[in-house]
Image (cartoon, grey):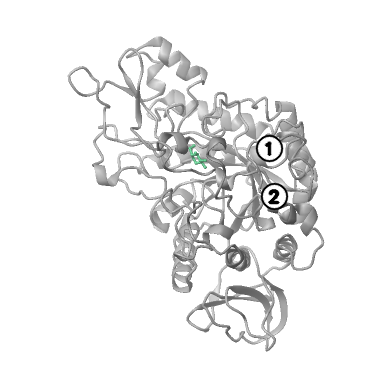
């Protein structure tokens, strides 16, 4: 790859959820050779980089976010040689590769955790994780009231009576980031993958590594949930000390050259707190989840965009934009809700089998939202299948649900599997071209018509909309990094201009119920749906214009 110190500032990055992207061996589960075979598709889509969700050896208690060995590949996904070949092929095609790193917790099958169990209380092995005695007369009560993000106590007891912390599933014990051995180990793991040529890392739950060493109770009403927490005073979410870790990581990546990059996954409450992760000596970028959480309402979207750009700019970082990922309800379904305007992404707000939705409305809004996202300054993340307009699968049979949230919630919260169904490549075949076997989650029959094969070359298809938008984003200096200027327009619409190197582009998005007149323009470059006969911009439609 040609070194480029700023490629990440305006990259379009495609998220591959490895289990569900492409299955090369008929196992029903996606794998590295599968991804490799589809790289030309990704190049043609017009993205700059792929982010691959964890591919490490894992018992899959949390879909691979329970890592048993950070320096190897899960056998069902392939081998280290497959990873090397994938990185080489991607680079050959001009695509960068970002991998997931999971530093908050390992799998309980990791050799360090097994050694900790064997070594017993007070041992150096236990000190790599967070073991504590319990409360109560016989230590039978957990050390604190902290709750796991997946439900239930965040502490599990081992046979000798001690408890260990797991902010996620019990099979995901939290590391002790006070221990220098943990710090050194992760810096070494980064080097292991940088040496193999990866271009960057997506950092899983980047905001939870440091815990308040006095281990205070949180208080029942402030318990941990996936999407609402912040603050230097919280015992484990977003503590100020976590930034030391990333200053160390930045020196590691900088030693490999200027174009290796990090993106933090940090669900924090404000753009200002998020921006702290992207200060000049820390991480390059962080996912901007304020945008994911924003409902389909013009004033909220406008304010969110402004706040996020301003907070990132204050530390010299670009912002990022995300509409969908493997943890939230796909945006085509979020925006389909008839009982809200679709901003909720927490477990409680997920779209379920009984939520009233209008799928056609959802897709129309999703396409408009994508043109909005791809016109904003900064980098943008595309979750596999959103380029096909895939909806969330809200009615998966209960007996196939694999998300630990389903079990941990006592079968009250279905979890995230509906966003993780293997994607359809062709109109028929045992798993619509995903692979030769039965996919690990069943695909709806209707996905045949949403497959790549069904949409390829079809004017107006969602796939062709994404291709055109990404192609233009590449070729047009006005798009990508930079700033935006809001233009006057109707209250329910967002009109803004992007300009750079003599190129100007206007994005107009109508979020209100009635058609609105377009701002003055010379040419319609791209539209998320048909314009009205009189040239007005219909409801829930976005357009890119060459301004007059
Ligand atoms: C965030 C990941 O995206 C999610 O899938 C996972 O369950 C948690 N972190 C825990 O690793």
In the rendering, at what x and y percent does residue 189 appear?
Answer: 57, 29
Label 1 secondary element = loop
Q: Circle 2 is placed at which residue position?
A: 445
Regarding residue 7, the answer to whether it shows in the image is no
Q: Is residue 544 above or below residue 259?
A: below
The crowding category of the residue bearing disc 1, from other C-alpha atoms within 10 Å (few below 14, some 14 to 19, many at least 20), is many
Q: Are the residues flagged by discs 2 and 1 in contact, CB closer than 8 Å?
A: no
Q: Give left or right: position of 408 versus 318.
A: left
In the rendering, at what x and y percent does residue 191 appear?
Answer: 60, 31
User: Relative to the observer, which residue lies in front, 397 or 392?
Assistant: 397
The residue under the point 50% across, 67% down is 296
The residue under the point 73% across, 66% down is 472
For the N terminus, give its image quadrant.
top right
User: Relative to the observer, which residue lies in front, 366 or 107?
Assistant: 366
Q: Give left or right: position of 323 versus 521.
A: left
Residue 547 lies in what quarter of the image? bottom right
Q: Is residue 541 above or below residue 35?
A: below
- Within 8 Å: ligand 1 and the Cβ of disc 2? no
- What distance separates the C-alpha of mark 2 from that of mark 1? 13 Å
Label 2 secondary element = helix
Q: Circle 1 is placed at which residue position?
A: 439
In the rendering, at what x and y percent does residue 7 appear?
Answer: 65, 53
Discs 2/1, front = 2
């Amino acid at each position: 790859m040609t070194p480029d110190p700023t490629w990440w500032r305006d990259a379009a990055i495609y998220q591959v959820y490895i289990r569900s992207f492409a299955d090369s061996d008929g196992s029903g589960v996606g794998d590295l050779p599968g991804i490799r075979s589809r790289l030309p598709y990704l190049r043609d889509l017009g993205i700059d980089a792929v982010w691959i969700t964890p591919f490490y050896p894992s018992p899959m208690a949390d879909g691979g976010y329970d890592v048993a060995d950070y320096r190897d590949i899960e056998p069902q996904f392939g081998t280290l040689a497959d990873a090397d070949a994938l990185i080489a092929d991607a680079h050959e095609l001009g695509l960068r590769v970002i991998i997931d790193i999971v530093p908050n917790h390992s799998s309980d099958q990791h050799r360090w955790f097994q050694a900790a169990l064997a070594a017993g209380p007070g041992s150096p092995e236990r000190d790599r994780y967070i073991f504590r005695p319990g409360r109560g007369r016989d230590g039978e009560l957990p050390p604190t009231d902290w709750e796991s993000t997946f439900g239930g106590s965040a502490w599990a007891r081992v046979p000798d009576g001690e408890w260990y912390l797991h902010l996620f599933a019990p099979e995901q014990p939290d590391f002790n980031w006070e221990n220098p051995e943990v710090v050194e180990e992760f810096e070494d793991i980064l080097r292991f993958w940088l040496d193999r040529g990866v271009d960057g890392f997506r950092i899983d739950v980047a905001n939870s590594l440091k815990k308040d060493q006095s281990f205070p109770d949180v208080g029942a009403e402030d318990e941990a949930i996936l999407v609402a927490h912040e603050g230097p005073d919280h015992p484990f979410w977003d503590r100020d000390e976590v930034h030391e870790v990333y200053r160390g990581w930045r020196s590691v990546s900088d030693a490999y050259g200027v174009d290796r990059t990090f993106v933090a996954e940090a669900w924090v409450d404000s753009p200002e707190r998020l921006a702290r992760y992207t200060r000049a000596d820390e991480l390059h970028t962080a996912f901007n989840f304020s945008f994911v959480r924003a409902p389909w309402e013009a004033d909220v979207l406008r304010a969110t965009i402004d706040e996020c750009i301003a907070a990132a700019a204050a530390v010299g970082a670009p912002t990022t934009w995300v509409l969908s990922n493997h943890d939230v309800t796909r945006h085509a379904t979020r925006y389909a809700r008839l009982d809200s305007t679709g901003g909720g992404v927490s477990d409680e707000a997920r779209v379920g089998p009984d939520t009233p939705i209008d799928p056609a409305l959802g897709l129309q809004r999703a396409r408009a939202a994508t043109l909005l996202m791809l016109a904003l300054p900064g980098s943008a993340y595309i979750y596999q299948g959103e380029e096909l307009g895939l909806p969330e699968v809200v009615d998966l049979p209960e007996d196939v649900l694999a998300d630990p949230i389903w079990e941990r919630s006592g079968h009250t919260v279905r979890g995230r599997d509906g966003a993780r169904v293997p994607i359809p490549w062709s109109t028929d075949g045992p798993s619509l071209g995903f692979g030769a076997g039965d996919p690990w989650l069943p695909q709806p029959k209707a996905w045949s018509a949403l497959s790549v094969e069904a949409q390829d070359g079809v004017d107006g298809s969602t796939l062709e909309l994404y291709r055109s938008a990404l192609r233009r984003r590449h070729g047009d200096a006005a798009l990508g990094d930079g700033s935006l200027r809001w233009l006057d327009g109707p209250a329910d619409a967002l009109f803004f201009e992007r300009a750079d190197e003599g190129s100007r582009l206007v994005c107009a998005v109508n979020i209100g119920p009635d058609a609105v007149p377009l701002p003055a323009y010379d040419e319609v470059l791209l539209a998320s749906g048909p314009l009205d006969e009189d040239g007005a911009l219909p409801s829930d439609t976005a357009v890119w214009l060459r301004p007059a």
